[in-house]
Image (cartoon, coloured by chain):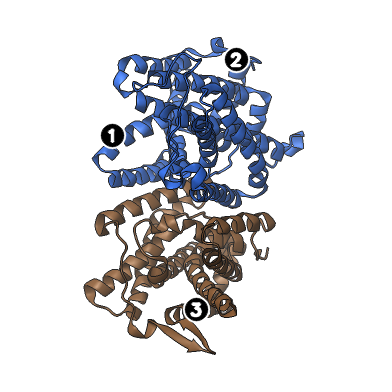
Chain colours: A brown, B blue
Amino acid sequence: MLGNLIGVLFDGVAYGSLLFVISIGLSVTMGLMNFINLAHGAFAMLGGYASVMAMSRLGIPFLAALPIAFVVSATAGIVLERTLYRRLYKATHLDQVLFSIGLVFMTIAATTYFFGPQQQPVQLPPFLRGQVHLLGLDFGAYRLFLIGVVVAVTLALTWLIERTRFGAEIRASVDNQQASAGLGINVSRVFTLTFALGSGLAGLGGGLGIDVLGLDPTFPLKYMVYFLLVVAVGGAGTIKGPLFAALILGVFDVAGKYYAPQVGSFIIYVVMVAMLLLFPNGLVGRRA
Amino acid sequence: MSAKGRPEREYRSAQREGSSIYPLAIWKLSRLEIAFWLVPVAAFFLFPKHLTLGSQILITALFAMSLDLILGYARIVSLGHAAFFGLGAYTAGLLAKYGWGEPLSGLLLATAVATLAGLLTSFLVVRGQDLTRLMVTLGIGLMLYEASNQASSITGGVDGLSGVEMGKLFGVFAFGMNGKTAYVYCLVVLFIVFMVARTLVRSPFGLSLRGIREGEKRMPAIGASVPRKLVAVYTVGAGIAGIAGALLAQTTQFVGIDVFAFNRSADLMIMLVLGGTGYLYGGLIGAAVFMLLQSYLSSLNPVYWEFWLGLLLVIIVLFARGGILGGLTALRNKFSRVRE
C-alpha cells in the first residue's frame, strides 16, 4: 500500500516535470508579453515530430534527437514571433485567443496531411527502459531520467535568469518595458529570444514526452488545458509557480486515474477550478 | 470628426427608436432588418429539400447570438459556452425520453435548467481576469463533458441519448421527416428570442453593458455595479444557449455527447467573430456563412476544412477585425460621410 502510494507519487512527479518543461515557455510569454498563446502545444508537437523523424529517417539516437527537437522548435518560434506574434502583443486577449486557436487548427490539419492521423512510435534506448531498484522499490528508468532532465533544466533556467546579463534584461523587461527600453535594453530582441527559448523548451518537452503523452496531430488541443492550467494556477512570469503547479497537477492527475479511474479526468478539472478560485493570480504572484 | 460623429449618431438613432417596453415590438424593426428576416422565410419555400440544414443553421444562429451577449456586449472571453447548450439539450432530450414529449414545456424547462446553471457559474466567472475567466469557463465545459461521458447509464455516454420521442407541437404539428415543423418551430423561437435580446441590449441595462465594454474601471464612478451586470448578462446568455440546445435535441430527437465538446465552443466563437461581435445580427450572419461553407467544404475533405478554418481565423484577427458586419458598417460610414 505504501509502496503503491510512493509509486503513484513518483509517477505523478515525473508527469508533472514533463508538463513543467513544456509549459514554462508559456509562462514566460504570458508574463513577459502578456500574450495568451493557446498554440503553445503546437511547438511541443513540432519538437516531438522533429525528434521522431530524426530517429526514424536519419537514424539519429534518442539522446541526440532531443537537442534537434529543441533547435527546430526554437527556430519555428523565432520565425513566428518575428512575422505574426509580435503584431498582436498590443491586441486584446480575445484577438490573441482567436489567433492562436486558428494556428492550432492549421497545425492539426497540416500535421495530419503530412504524417497521417496515427500515433507516432518512439524507440527508447535500452538503458532507459525497464526498472531501477532503489531502497527496495522499483522505479521506471525513463521516469527517473525525466525527473533528472527537469532538475537540470530548472537549475539552468534559474541560473540564466538570476545570474546572467540576459536574465537581468528579461527581468527588467517583465517589470517595465518602457523603462527598460529607456535604459538601452533592446526589448524587442529580448522578446524574440525568450519566445524562442520557450518554444525550444516546449519542443524538448514534446520530444521527451512521446513515451508518456503520446504523439498524434491532436496533441496541441488534447493537452492545451494542462499547459494553460500550469501557468494559470502557478502564476505567469515566474519559474517557481509553474513548477509547483505542474507537480501538483501531475500528482493529482496520476493519483486520480489510479485510485478512481471511473471518475477519469473529472478530478483535475475540479482541482483546477478550485485552485483558480482560491488563487486568482496564481500560486506565486510576480513581484511588482 | 469620426470620433465625434459616431456617438452622436448612435444617440440620435437611440432617441428615434426609443427603448420600447414591448419586447416584440416588430414595428420598431428597420426596413433592412425586415428584409433580413424575410430571407429565412423565403428559404423555407425555395429550398424544401434542405430544411434539415436550415434548422441546424437557425439553431446555431441562436447559439451564436447568446455568445454575442456575453462576448460582444460584456467582453467575457468564454471557451466553454457549449456547457449551457449541452445542458439544455440533455434536459429536453431526457424529458422527452422519459415521457414528457410536449415540446414547448420541455423547451421552457431546459431554458430554466441552463439559466440556473448560468447563474450559479457566473459568480465563478466574473471574479477573475481574462486568463482566469477563460480557464474557468473551459474547465466547467470539460467537467460537464466528462460527467456526461461517465454517467452513461443516464446520458448514453459516447453513444449519445437515443429514444427521444417528441410529441406534436400544439398537439397538431408532428416533427416529421420533411423537417417543415422543425424549421418553422426553430425560426419562430429564434425570432422571439432575438427580439427579446434586441430589446435587452437597447434598454438602459444594455447601455450600461456597453459602458462596461468601453471602460470597465469608470463604470463604478457613475454608480453601476459591474459584477452584478456581468452576472445578469452571463445568466441570460446561458439561458439562451440552453434554448438552442433544447431545440437541437427536440428537432433531431437525439443528443450526442459532442454537445459539450470544446470544438463546439471554439467553432461558435469563430462564427461570431466572422459575422462581427456586438451587433446581435453578427452571430446570425456568421453562423449561416460558417454552416454553409462547412457543409460545402467539409464534404470535400474534413481535414482540409479545419485548415481553412484556422487560416480564416488568423486572417480575420490580423486584417479584418470587425468581421462581415464590421466591414459593412465601415463601408456605410464611409459613404454617409461622403454624402455629408
Q: Give the residue number, with chain letter if any, for mark 3.
A: A147
Mark 1, other Cα within 10 Å: few <14 / some 14–19 / many ≥20 = few
Residue A177 numbered tag: none
Q: Nearer the viewer, residue B128 or B3?
A: B128
Q: Give the residue number, with chain letter if any, for mark 2.
A: B17
Rounded to the nearest angstrom, the CA distance separating label 1 from label 3 is 49 Å
Q: Nearer the viewer, residue B121 or A39?
A: B121
Residue extending farthest to the top is B27
- Amino acid type at circle 1 is Tyr
The answer for which chain carries disc 2 is: B
For mark 2, give the secondary structure: helix
The answer for which chain carries disc 1 is: B
User: Which x, y percent locates residue B338?
Assistant: 44, 21
Rounded to the nearest angstrom, the CA distance separating label 2 from label 1 is 39 Å
Q: Is residue A78 visible?
A: no
For mark 3, give the secondary structure: helix
Could you tell me which quadrant the N terminus of chain A lies in?
bottom right
Mark 3, other Cα within 10 Å: few <14 / some 14–19 / many ≥20 = some
Of badges 2 and 1, nearer the viewer stands 1
Rounded to the nearest angstrom, the CA distance separating label 3 from label 2 is 66 Å
Say above or below: A176 vs B99: below
Q: Is residue B183 left or right of residue B66?
A: left
Residue B296 numbered tag: 1
User: Which x, y percent locates residue A36?
Assistant: 51, 54
User: Which x, y percent locates residue B212?
Assistant: 65, 37
Q: Could you say which quadrant of the image residue A126 lies in?
A: bottom left
The answer for which chain carries disc 3 is: A
How many circles with numbers are drawn on the protein? 3
Say above or below: B226 vs B51: below
- Amino acid type at circle 2 is Glu
Q: Are marks 2 and 1 on the same chain?
A: yes
Q: Is residue A42 left or right of residue B219?
A: left
